[in-house]
Amino acid sequence: MRLSFTTISIFLSLIRAPGVVSQTGLAPKQFLNLPLGEVKPAGWLHDQLMVQTNGLAGHEHDFYDYVAETDWTGGSSYYSNLEEAGSYWFNGMVPNGVLANDATIQSQTQYFLDYVLDHQDSTGWLGPEVNTTKPRYLWGRYPFFFGAIQMVEANSSLAGRVVPALHTFVKLANTMLHNNGEGLEDWTNTRWEDFVMTLQWCLYDFYPDGNEELLLDTMQLLKSYGDPWEEVFKEEYFPKTAVENLTNPFPFLTWHGVNMAEGLKALPATYRFTHNQSDLDAASLGWDLLFQYHGRPSGIFAADEYLAGLEAARGTELCLVVETMFSGSYLYQVIGDPKFADRVERVAYNALPATLTGDMWSRQYLQQQNQIAAKNMNPDPFPTDGSYSNVFGLEPNYPCCTVNHPQGYPKFISNAFVTSPDKTSLVHVYLGPFSTQTTLADGNQVTVTVDTLYPFSDTLTTTIEAAGAFTYRVRIPSWVANGTISVNGAQAEAVSPSNGLHSVSVAAGTTTIVLNLPAEITLEPRPHGSVAVHRGPLHYAFDIARTQKVLAQNAQEARAVDLEFDATVPWQYALDTSSLRFQYSPPASGVLPSPVYDSGLPPMSISATACQIDWSVAGDTFASPPPTSPECTGPTTNITLWPFGATKLRIGEFPTVNLTA
Ligand SMILES: *[C@@H]1O[C@H](CO)[C@@H](O)[C@H](O)[C@H]1NC(C)=O
Ligand SMILES: *[C@@H]1O[C@H](CO)[C@@H](O)[C@H](O)[C@H]1NC(C)=O
Ligand SMILES: *[C@@H]1O[C@H](CO)[C@@H](O)[C@H](O)[C@H]1NC(C)=O
Ligand SMILES: *[C@@H]1O[C@H](CO)[C@@H](O)[C@H](O)[C@H]1NC(C)=O
Ligand SMILES: *[C@@H]1O[C@H](CO)[C@@H](O)[C@H](O)[C@H]1NC(C)=O
Ligand SMILES: *[C@@H]1O[C@H](CO)[C@@H](O)[C@H](O)[C@H]1NC(C)=O
């Protein structure tokens, strides 16, 4: 009998489907993350973490109302404590404190943990609703749980205190959910996967304590009440334009940018208890649709509250930048597709630094791909968000990203290395300067240090010290052209990645690996015939010289300022794309400036021949779409494109002209 393709598919689905019946427990991930603290930043990335620690993130506890409160009994603010602000802050500052080895931050997070656990009530509830008549919604605790898990990872002797408190809370939550979905509201319904992941990571994988059935039941309840991400991410329902004029067939908060960034984790988390390949396929398709219809050359997608399409003046919220990075790391660990890792790295090195001042004291709510001013905008280009959203400040438009953005770099660092589930191999996922020390299978103690300026260099030198032999894998990004690897001084050979990873059999003792990963300059087509310029991990933009005006200064902390930026030079250029030339001047000292993400500081740039054109502003504060087929209105000139993350005002999507005539 000749099987048709359809017959084979049905047959395969029959083989997979019974897995649900025969396989109990959770499906394994492709890769395991290392506990917090085992991967550390080095070189310029360590400096970047210190800039964050010495900036707004590291000082919020000293002055910022929403997290400076030392107890919640006042209950003054909706955002405080475990309702949003404290929970987000804790989730980011736990890894920040550990990775920066900062005793002050660590004592703040320890105090926060102790305070929450000490005030758990007899029903098991955690949070400021204890001893009040406030309604008890589950979501606000989820980022707190992520922080608590990380504390246990960093110091397993805390498990004895955290794990029983979580099990008690889960018993209560399970009862509430069985009681007609008590504890749920619209936001909790979109973010259910964060609780599912807590149940899986911490409790089921490591500390089940005999509660497996209750944990699985709770996961299923959360999913059955929660928003249907497998439907939201289907091609037929997925919005292909900015959504302000569309009707969402599902609860409207599913098209909210941060919910979607967090919801990217829902299907891989679901897969672990359904064992259903269709959940992974839907997660992968959803990721592709999101970036196809709302993606940005900086790696991220646009949602100025709700999904915002492809136009370069629309906004991307900072919270969704860091949540997408975290979700992408999880997707990579569950599914193993290198596309997730490629994009997380691109976001970390482009979209994230672009939306913070170099010193990380001020942050935007919304960043724009083409951003010709950062100021109170009139008219406002964002249909839902306020006119102050692209100001760099303490809490422009909304406070959430002030407390949520600090998770970005620390979690990127923590997830830069993973192991195979059997721990026989170690995988270097995110390229950059790191060190890691871990124990692989059979007690094999391994130390790895990666010396590089990457993404501000193409070369990485990795030194491995191992007690025994193991397989080392390193991600070769999809943009690498003619990459080579040399092991222990041998002649360099072409890299030969399989599923994005190049493998090296490492012997006991010391191994040195030199990777050279060059890339071509590439062009990405954008709307209206415009182009975006890339080379390797970095996206390049015209950096518009700016003036700076202080709009506000915090009364308690003078460094927390709101800044307006205005252009001081023309930005209306069209590029001749045949003229692009890469320029690299590595620092003679071998050390990059601190901070590196500001105007003129990175050692890489791209020169371009260009001319001025007519390109109107919309209102007086944002650029109209790039004109299609423009004419030069001025002489041919040379302009320099800089790494996008170092630009605070910029053009990242250009019209093109042919100037070679
Ligand atoms: C709730 O209030 C009672 C009465 O004031 C107090 O004894 C108890 O410690 C409080 N419980 C918590 C968990 O704060
Ligand atoms: C780990 O936690 C325990 C229990 O709280 C504490 O006594 C110990 O000092 C912590 N260790 C480190 C290295 O922080
Ligand atoms: C939504 O409708 C308004 C009013 O008709 C229109 O100006 C706008 O361009 C539409 N937006 C999208 C993304 O279609
Ligand atoms: C597996 O996925 C398919 C397709 O989405 C669905 O019809 C089926 O109900 C799923 N099975 C389980 C147990 O989730
Ligand atoms: C890769 O090799 C080809 C063939 O030698 C060459 O034309 C191209 O410029 C190289 N690209 C890079 C980025 O080194
Ligand atoms: C632009 O730069 C190129 C290469 O450095 C140079 O040959 C050319 O003269 C420059 N053109 C202008 C208009 O400055």
Image (cartoon, rainbow, N blue to C red):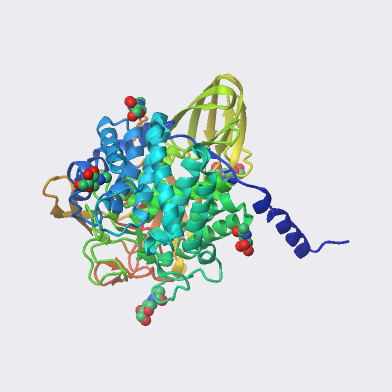
Looking at the picture, tell me which residue is in the foreground, 373 or 35: 35
299 up-or-down from 294: above or below: above
Could you say where residue 60 lies in the image, as x and y percent from the top left? Answer: 22, 44
Q: In which quarter of the image is residue 592?
A: top left
Does residue 508 lie above or below 645 as drawn?
above
Count of marks, rendered view: 0
Q: Position of residue 246 (x, y in %)?
A: 43, 76
Q: In this view, does 111 lie above or below 200?
A: above
The image quarter in which residue 377 lies: bottom left
**Residue furthest left as drawn:** 555
Q: Position of residue 132 (x, y in %)?
A: 24, 54
The residue at the far right in this view is 1
Q: In this view, does 501 lie to the left or right of 410?
A: right
Point 35% across, 65% down: residue: 314
User: Residue at image x 28%, y 48%?
Assistant: 86
Is residue 261 visible in the rendered structure shown here?
Answer: no
Pinpoint residue 147: horizontal percent, then vertical percent: 37, 42
The residue shown at (58%, 37%) is: 421
Front residue of 128 and 372? 128
Can residue 89 be seen from the camera position used here? yes
Give the quarter of the figure containing the N terminus.
bottom right
Horizontal arrangement in the rendering, residue 453 relative to residue 442 (left or right): left
Horizontal placement of 443 versus 317: left or right? right
**Would residue 354 be found to the left or right of residue 513 on screen?**
left
Q: Which of 575 and 252 is in front in this view?
A: 252
